[in-house]
Image (cartoon, coloured by chain):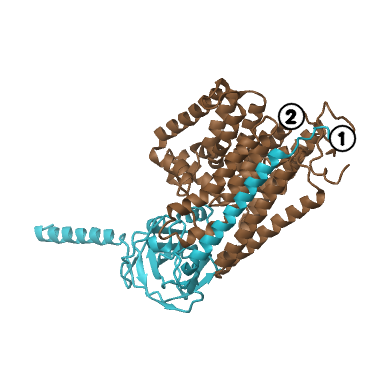
Chain colours: A cyan, B brown
Amino acid sequence: MSAGSTFVFAVLLVCFYVLFALSFLPTATAVSVGATVKGFVEGEGFHRTVRYTVDTGSWKNKSCFIALYEELPSSVYVNYDELADLRRRQESNACVDGEIDVELFGERAYEQDVTACAQLISTKTTLSFPIHQRYHFSNPSGEPVDVTLARPVLLLGCKERIKDHRVSKAKICSPCSELTKKWRDVYYIWEGYNNFEWKIPVGNTSRKFLVTSMTHLVTLTGAAYVLWTIHKSFKVPKKSKDN
Amino acid sequence: MSKQAVVGVSTKAPKVVAKKKTAQPNGIVSVQIHCVIAFLLRLILITYSNYHDKYFKVPYTDVDYKVYTDAARYITKGQSPYDRHTYRYTPLLALLMTPNIYVHQDCGKVFFSVVDILVAKIMRKLLIRQNFKQQTANLCALLWLYNPLAVVISTRGNADSLAVYLVLWTLYLLQSDHIVMAGIVHGLSIHFRLYPLAFSLVMYIYLQEKNLFLPNKKQLKLIVPCALTLLDLTAIFYGLYGKKFLDESFIYHLVRKDVRHNFSVFFYMLYLSANEGPSLVQKFLTFLPQVSILVALAFRYSTKEKLPFAFFTQAITMVTFNPVMTSQYFFWFLSLLPICLPYLKMSLMRTITLLVTWILSQSLWLYAAYLLEFKGIDSFDHIWISGIVFFIVNIKILIDLINCYKL
């Protein structure tokens, strides 16, 4: 074999191995996922459940995960420990980042970022998480505080590369963040919502004087009456145990 | 039998034997068998609680039980129980709950149910020590064993059955003249839950002899072990968990300012001033009534036989005048009612009227709170007014109890 043909053979061999190795690399899947999302908030008071139904049309892939990322206003909160409990019971796979103090008033609390995620085993996926209202300081008119939940960001994470969707900048919390290396933003059609805006009742500061004076009047009178009864009981002649 | 002497038909064993009628629990079935039945009833409810929690929106299990269990989980991982947000109890409780992680999630509920049965047994022993007839003591124990509130509270996983057991044990030891041991248990009791601290004054006065200011030997026997127990436990857990232990399990309860809706008569007043905080005058006016009644009761009922009634009325006072009041606080005084019952000479009609009024006034508040919490309706004014009504009812009950207490 001449030196030239040996060289050509060597080049071909290298090309073969390179192509062989490349065949093992993940392929860039050219998918364009078109999804629709419906949102619903269950409950009316301080304790509500946010429920989203994500419909991916005919597209599903068991190696993919779907997530909804939402920034909550400080008027409401998700309980970190409650979510941990739901995850242990496998009732929800939501997680939260941000303010963890559930007792703070709305005005003093930081915001939270909540993510609910699930494996894409069906074309319709329901993601939910419980939320709670925070107490707010009273105001002179007693006007309730408005709460509006923003629309969530829909994310898709697959083991395969997805070319048509850009990598999301959303800060996904653990354990959702561990499901896939990259989460990608997915455009979706919002199919309506229900109860995403509501009002939180607050106290009326203009009644503070009335409330304070009446409360003290009642408690001091009550205490005086009890003290007088105790005093009076000293004077009661002791009865024999046999009576 | 007179119309008055109905509720507390008490008979002291050696003095009155057969003249007064004493309701008998059941001539055949012994108290021990009732304990077994009551425990089985609790086990059934614990089993049901799992079903209920799975299928109902409002869970049966107490939210605090999840807090204890989470705190226990942290302990099993070698972390601090105070890593669990809102865990505000002794680390001992989290330690006791570690079987929830290692064995089964309901172990804690079973443990509280066992303690509940022990509460009934110690009530019976206390009454027998006070020379009441076996039947009277048994009847009072049965009132606890089958008290729906006690059954539900322990099976929901509330730890207060343990707190009330420690209070009753202290009382029993004191009545049995085991003063040093009473001091130790009282220290443990205060470490476990802060409220028994209020019983300290009456216990101290009870041991008073001719001394006025300086403590006598008996009083020292109570104070020193109590203080040492409290200090030792505090030092141990401070060493283990640092300042967070002190902040969460002691200081928080002393300066607690929870202004979210609760049964307290002070709730709305404190909520309206939450932004700027209550003034010194307001603080003084809030605590003055409570402290003055607690002191008066301590001096009034400090003899040996009156000691249970002192604890009972002081517990009612603490709960009634507290700036924060939740339904679990009722357990503190309801657990002391059976041991005072034989001394209460109240007509049946008055008893029923008071009981119904107490339940109705609570329901009134609960309805207003339901509108706010579950319907999102502004019902703050209703909550405030029903809080005042509930306070007045509690005061009326306290006054009637004092008037009907006959030793």
Residue A189 is situated, as x and y percent measured from the top left of the image, at 42, 79
Q: Residues within 10 Å of mark 1 (few under 14, many from 20)?
A: few
Q: Is residue B251 visible?
A: yes
* The C terminus of chain B sits in image quarter: top right
Residue, disc 2: B130
Residue A172 is situated, as x and y percent measured from the top left of the image, at 37, 61
Using residue B11 as the reference point, say whether residue B265 is left or right of it: left
Using residue A140 as the reference point, say whether residue A25 is left or right of it: left
* The N terminus of chain B sits in image quarter: top right
Residue, disc 1: B28
Q: Amino acid at mark 1?
A: Ile
Local SS, label 1: loop
Task: Give how far apart the Cα atoms at labels 2 and 1 are.
Answer: 24 Å
Q: Residue at x 48, y 71 (%)?
A: A142
Q: Amino acid at mark 2?
A: Gln
Q: Residue at x 40, y 67 (%)?
A: A73
Local SS, label 2: loop
Residue B266 is situated, as x and y percent measured from the top left of the image, at 54, 56
Q: Is residue B390 above or below residue B179?
A: below
